[in-house]
Every structure is written in C-alpha cells, then in structure tokens.
Amino acid sequence: MYGSNPFSAQDAWNAANGQSSLGSSAPPPSVFGALPYPSASSPLPNSVTFNFTSLSPTILNCKVIGPRNETYFRVVTDGGYTMLKDARGSNIALLEWQNHPTVEAPNLLTKQAVGRWLRLSTERSQRFMVHNGVSYIWSPYDRFLQLSIPGSYDVLARVSKTYDAVVLELTPQAIQLGLLEVGVLATILLQCGKSID
C-alpha cells in the first residue's frame, strides 16, 4: 500500500486526514521520515520529554536531551552501523544497516531483524513491539505516533516532529515499565527514513 515504513508516507498521512497531496496547502513532507510538522500542542500529561536535537543531518546522528536540559543519549552512525550510547558514552544498542537491518541491545533485546522487533501490521498502518513479555503497539494519531498496549486507550508514549527536532514524550507508567531505552531506540528506527523491514 505505501511501502515498508507506514510512518514515512506523506500521501498516507494526507489520505487519512482527507487531504490530497496535489495542490494541497499541507506542509511539505518531512525530510527525516515519519511525521508532518506539528503545530504547538499540549504535552502528554505528566510526561517526561526527550528531544532528539543536533540532527546531523538526520536522527541517525544526534543528541537526545532530557530533563534539566541534560544529554541522556547520543546516536552515532559510522558506515553501516548506528550506535545508541548513554551519557557516559557506553553502547546501549547497535543497529546494523543491511538488506534486512538488525538491532541488538544487551539487557534489552537479543539480536534480531528490526522488522521482527517492530513488526508491521497486516494492514501496514501500525507496528507491534514486545518488551519484557508485554506487547505494545505504535499507531499514528493526529500529528503523533502513539505507543499503547493493544486494547487500551492509555497512551504510554508519543513521538512528534518540529522543524528541527524529534520529540519523545514518555509517561511515568512507560518509564516504570522500562520503556525509556526501547522508546528511544524505536523512535530512532521509526523516524530514520530508512526501510526497516
């Protein structure tokens, strides 16, 4: 329907919102992938916000700034590899870019195909993720990608874009469920603009 990454298709976004890409006044497609540029919106209640900034030139080389304007993570790409590093410079996760990209994160997930970890739904409109035995779903809603547990209306996290950053908001419940690092990793993959299947 619209390729291997449902979150990078501007036409799908326009169609879902009753707009046409021809002659529309919608903002231009995002350079980095998944979402159109949002206007100012209210934050997710009680959330902790992480800003992916200093995109050089994409989210695959950036800093992740969290509370108190501190750098929590760095994303570094060199050749066919992208590393997610913590503030001390220790590797948290490794992405290997090949025909079928792989992801591994010691203590978080074993090495596997990205398309297996962020499995695309049959209708190609959502992605499923399992962490610590719990299933989660990433779904587009309004100007966001939202993370929830299937069958629940509670939003655990959401991703949005501004003109110069990607924003990840995590609820306290998401952090208690251990979704900080995997949320950051999923945000990188869903916003990188590359095929992840």
Image (cartoon, grey):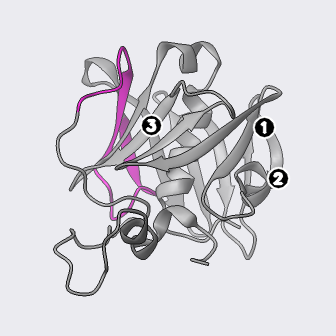
Across and down, in percent, residue 92 comes to 63, 36
- The outermost residue toward the bottom is 22
Q: Nearer the viewer, residue 101 or 127?
A: 127
Q: Secondary structure at mark 1?
A: strand
Residue topped by disc 2? 112
Give the amino acid type for the residue marked by disc 2 in the picture: Gln
Residue at image point 51% right, 59% down: 77
Give the amino acid type for the residue marked by disc 3 in the picture: Arg
Which comes sooner in the sequence, label 3 or label 2? 2
Residue topped by disc 3? 158
Label 1, label 2: how far apart the Cα atoms are = 8 Å
* Res 31 → quadrant: bottom left
Which comes sooner in the sequence, label 1 or label 3? 1
Across and down, in percent, residue 98 comes to 71, 72
- Above or below, 92 against 43 in this view is below
Label drawn at residue 109: 1
Q: Secondary structure at mark 3?
A: strand
Across and down, in percent, residue 81 comes to 62, 61
- The residue stretch that appears in magenta: 42-64
Residue at image point 82% right, 48% down: 111
Label 1, label 3: how far apart the Cα atoms are = 21 Å
Determine contact: label 1, label 2, CB under 8 Å: yes
The local crowd at label 1, few if under 14, some if 14 to 19, many if 20 or more residues have their Cα within 10 Å, is: some
